[in-house]
Image (spheres, grey):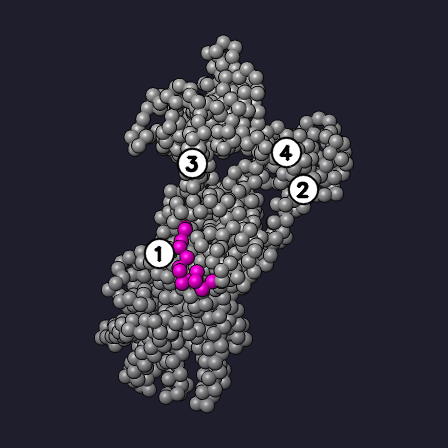
Amino acid sequence: MGLKEAQGGLTVEEAKQALQKFGFNELKEKKKTTVLDVFVRQFNNFIIYVLLAAAVISLLVGELVNFFVIVAIILFVVILGFIQEYRAEKTIAALKNFVKPTSRVLRSGAVQVVPGREIVPGDVILLETGDKVPADCKLLEIVGLKVDESMLTGESFPVEKKAGDEIYAGTSIVHGRCKALVTKTGMSTKLGSIAEMVQVEESETPLQRRINHLSKLLAGLALGVCLITFIVGLYRGAPLVDILIIAIALAVAAVPEGLALTLTLTLAFGMQKMAEHNAVMRKMLAVETLGSVTVIATDKTGTLTKNEMVVEQVYADGKVFKVTGEGYVPKGTFTLDGAEVDSTQQVGLTNLLRASALCTSASLEKKDNEWKGFGDPTEIAILVAAAKADQWKDDLETDYKLLEELVFSSESKVMTTIHADKANKGGKVAFTKGAPEVVIAKCKFIEKNGKIVKLTSAEAKKLLEINEGFSSNAFRSLAVAYAPVKTKKQLSSGLIFLGLVAMRDPPREEVLQAIAECKQAGIKVVMITGDNKDTAFAIGRQVGLTETVPASVLASLPLHLQKVMCDSVITGEELNSLSDADFAKIVNYVSIYARAAPEQKLRIVTALKQQGHIVAMTGDGVNDAPALKKADIGVAMGLKGTDVAKEASAMVLHDDNFATIVSAVRQGRTIYRNIEKFTSYLISRNFTEVILILLGLIFLGFDYLPLLALQILFINTFDEVIPAISLGLDPTRSEIMKQKPRNPSEQLLKKRNVAIILSTAAFIALSVFFVFLSSDPVGDIGKARTVVFASIISTILFIPLAFRSLHETVIDKNIFSNKLMVFGTISTFLVTVIAMYTPFFQEIFHLTPLGAMEWILPLSVGIATFAFVEIIKAVLRRFKTQMDETTY
């Protein structure tokens, strides 16, 4: 069907047939996340696998208590993780726009309003200012059409369209109206093709890799301990089933079952804290990833900037007036040389604002106590500025009735409106605005202090220089002129120049501080935008992104790369000219990418990851989705972001605020440090029991083991988890954002951590074994084991305090800043003590009551261990660099 034949649209029957053939006009997910998917995902944890194996073995050997305790722990971890991630998925769903869009369509020769999802190829749709384009279309007829394509291209300014051009699904009409033929719908659209690009398998987060690595290490250790214990026990004459039970108990002890639970609670708490600060995590294990990022790659429009044009300076009567105020609220002042002026007393300023307001097709309205603009953002900004000077378009049109509009075009580069001049009794006046070089060339005169004088070539040159000054500071400027009209010929060469209006999309107020904090934290912020190089550089300079490439780096580069890298800004065209090898040489030093296409964003993120960076990508448009998916963590905007961007991301910012990312980074870093602390704590506790049992087997034999299997399981299950959780929820410290990012390859167990773990475990095991020997195990094995049990649980009162920092002394930490630890450790100790004196539990766990004096040794072990850990940390601080290296 040709364009002429398509003008009348489809019949109702043809539309039904097309709907059956092409399907609904909607994006489809390759695999929708179901409730079952979220639940099953919780089992994808190596520690869970180990615990399941231990539970099965316990069941096979008849240890039902062990079996049910381990199963209960597994279920608790899985259910908690499921609840948190399911809530996150529901929150993301709530962020979507539930309003079902409709469109005006020509069907059987009549205009009908149909749901957007029922539009089909061949339909003819009618669009006007404010409408969202529902499908890919070919333009049939247009009237002054401009389309906002920023969600596809990243370009800030609306694009002018002509008949025969294409418009794309998801873009918006900001000026004019059109009739268009639908060519593609659903997944066949440009929007759909990008959505298809991001439907790939999820990759592991850095934390998943670290936890899985550690879990496998501990599983191997557990197997080794189990085997050694079994062999030594048999060699020492232990009964086969009895030594197998002890071996299983030690295997479970070597793999801290509290690790999975504490990790889940820590991440869940982190998700909750982030949600309170408007950052919604879609995947629990991604919470930590933001804390390890070394680069944040961010879009400009709507992310670093407000995505709303604001007039900030006006040139009139040879003076530059500055304009205050924000957004679309028509409140602000005009200043000249720092002093506030009354705009009504400035004739040139008033005339300029009146003319610019009348030469628009936009509107400004107050709805529900909120000011909203409709139309081209540039024109809305002009209306707001004029309203600040009490020049309201609606009021002005009573004296200047609109007669005709000559729309802006890429050829003319100007817009002109012709009005009836009420004061001139039937006369007409034309107001023109547009590209300064074009408008100035059409002017023969200039208005100064209410008088019209001839515009000289020298003055015209000066006006162009003033305009260049605006452009170099990221302003988009328009020139405004007018002329009494008798014939339209006057509009080409007889205009009277009024002045320049300079506007820009201002940076968010909090962005400058957020980027400064990122730099302090050793995080590089990279801006990737579709804007031109000058605009991108100017915005980058305002928010603190521009950097000078070190002279040593420049000198080491080939000449062609030196030219590209002179100001740390490169364009998409320059990037295309570089090979991957050349790009790898400079990617660490580029701060701003201008005129970047979506596929180039992917290339940038890929190159950064190949350099060893952990990359976070922020964005809101469909153009950002592939890079959001490729990045280690994608961060989508919740308010202005598209559904495609949100689906591709691990985190959604509810307030679209770049500063929220910094808050999330802070929380992420805290979470990782806390994971490091409770992991070290738990492993040291478990190593204690392993060493203790092996000492008993080697020196005393199976009949005189310091602890029984159920006693080990009780300590692991009830006495270690609460202190570990309190470490996992340790509050954020201010200096966390003054530290450099971790080495991306760093594992949870550095040399420092391993040294603390092994020395602490050995000290406690040897101390407790000494206590066991001194308690006469031959004479009363039950009492001796109870003293050992009491000694181990006594350390709960002291050791968690020492583990609140693996670097600093306990004096550097406010003990009461972690109230959960104070309450948790004391209450856990008391509950365990009560169990020791309760006949029912005494019988189950083979414990005997201790007298008051018999607590001296156990409590002494706790205090001595606390002092020992502090001494070890002090010694390790002297070898900081070597001890911070990764071991496992």
Residue labelled with disc 3? 465
Give me the C-alpha separation between circle 2 and circle 4.
Answer: 21 Å
- First in sequence, mark 4 or 1: give its number: 4
Residue labelled with disc 4? 162
- First in sequence, mark 2 or 4: give its number: 4
Helix, strand or loop for disc 1 = helix
Residue visible at 56% across and 23% down?
405
Dot 4, crowdedness within 10 Å: few (<14), some or many (≥20)?
some
* Residue 520: assigned label: 1
Inspect this view and state whether residue 782 appears.
no
Residue labelled with disc 2? 185
Give me the C-alpha separation between circle 3 and circle 2.
Answer: 48 Å
Q: Nearer the viewer, mark 4 or mark 1?
A: 4
Q: Nearer the viewer, mark 3 or mark 2?
A: 3
Q: Which residues are magenta?
A: 545-557
Helix, strand or loop for disc 2 = loop
Q: Disc 3 residue type?
A: Glu
Asked whether the beta carbons under mark 3 and mark 2 sit within 8 Å of each other, the answer is: no
Left or right relative to 156: residue 135: right
